Image (cartoon, rainbow, N blue to C red):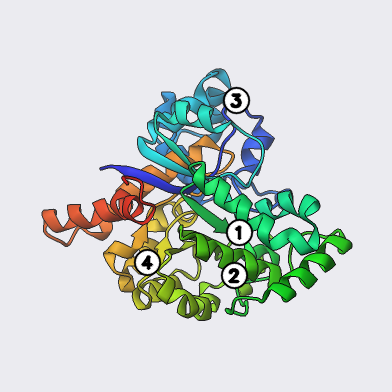
Amino acid sequence: MEVLDAHCHTVELGPLTDERFAAWCTESPWPPAPGTSFPDSRLGLAIRRWCAPALGLSPFAPLAEYAESRRSLPDAGARLLAAAGLSALLVDTGLTGGAALDELAAAAHAPVHSVVRLEQLAVSVAETAGGSGFGRSFSDALAAQLDAGAVAVKSIAAYRHGLDLDPERPGPAEVVRAADAWLRSGERLADPVLLRHLLWTAVDCGRPIQFHTGFGDPDAALLRADPAHLQPFCAATRSARVPIVLLHCYPYHRQAAWLAQLYPHVYADVGLAVTYTGARFDAVLAEFLELAPFGKVLYSSDAYGLPELYLVGAQQFRHSIRHVLADLPPGEAERIAGLVAAGNARRVYALDA
């Protein structure tokens, strides 16, 4: 089965200390509670199940044995990434560090396509543009990134304000005032007027817009990351026909599936849930597919930092979708699995154009 990772990040391909490895097994920035360990979790079990064989170990090898094997193999990161068997990677370039995109492509043995993070691009142009020139400078910079080959854009409005944004396009004078105030404050970009301006500029560009929704690190207010908050924006952008891809979604994946059923341009992406829920992803994937049309659900891993997350995501997805579709005739199951695994992403992101 072809598997295309439609939303991910770069990883650290070199050796990792046990502490660094454990830190990549959680969204929390803080140390674990006494007597606990982040890899002692569904994710940790999934790593031991799916990744141990790629390093020459038996499935579910003890964590200490796995860590020792990982440290002893200088190419462990590349082995794990290659073992995922991906056909392409769509990489959010908004997070720094880790392997360069060409290194990532070489290790994965697959082409890499970039995704522009709107808020990061806005910061990069704001200082030279000033408040009065911010709108035009951002639009020009985004067009340049897309012309250079980026296949989509991504918004982290859920981290900066929440998804409960006014759905209407802000006027030019509003944008100038908000940009002036933001630049004077020296604070990070969180003004809802500017976040709306970034989104509507992206709509004008016509490329798919990825939204972080659902769980993440503590910087995101989970209640305001419910994708249901985006219903007014989905309604406002329906006539533009620009694909809106709801990333992660969990624990609000049923709301995301509902939006994907209602609005022709809305899609739900299973990333992050597939790795963190491990063997329980069977149930989560079944719930994604309760309401969402099969042509509206996309696979991704949201892998970041650990190469293991690419492999866990791909293997757990392959395993879970077979279980979820096991009651269907083989031809139907194969067709639907192919759509979710790669076909839908190729169509939505125009990768074969």
| Residue 235 drawn above or below residue 282 | below
Number of residue marks: 4
**Which of pointers 4 and 2 indicates the residue nearer the eye?**
2
Q: Which disc, if any, is residue 257?
A: none
- Residue 272: x and y, percent? 50, 54
Relative placement, left or right, of 203 versus 254 is right
N-term-proximal mark, 3 vs 1 = 3
Callout 2–callout 1 Cβ contact below 8 Å: yes
Looking at the rendered structure, the kind of residue marked 4 is Phe
What residue would you read off at disc 2? 225
Q: CA distance from mark 3 to mark 2?
A: 33 Å
Decide which of tag 2 and tag 1 comes sooner along the chain. 1
Mark 4 vs 3, N-terminal side: 3
Q: Amino acid at mark 2?
A: Ala
- List the residue tagged with mark 3: 14
Task: Classify 152 as above or below 76.
Answer: below
Q: Residue visible at 73% across and 60% down?
A: 134
Q: Earlier in the sequence, mark 3 or mark 2?
A: 3
Q: Left of 93 or right of it: where is 135?
A: right
Identify residue type, mark 1: Gly
What's the residue type where badge 3 is placed? Gly
Q: Which secondary structure, mark 3?
A: loop
- 255 or 34: which is nearer to us? 255
The residue positioned 55% from the left and 52% from the top of the image is: 143
Q: To which residue does mark 4 refer? A: 288
The disc placed on residue 216 is 1
Provide the secondary structure element on which disc 2 rests.
Answer: helix
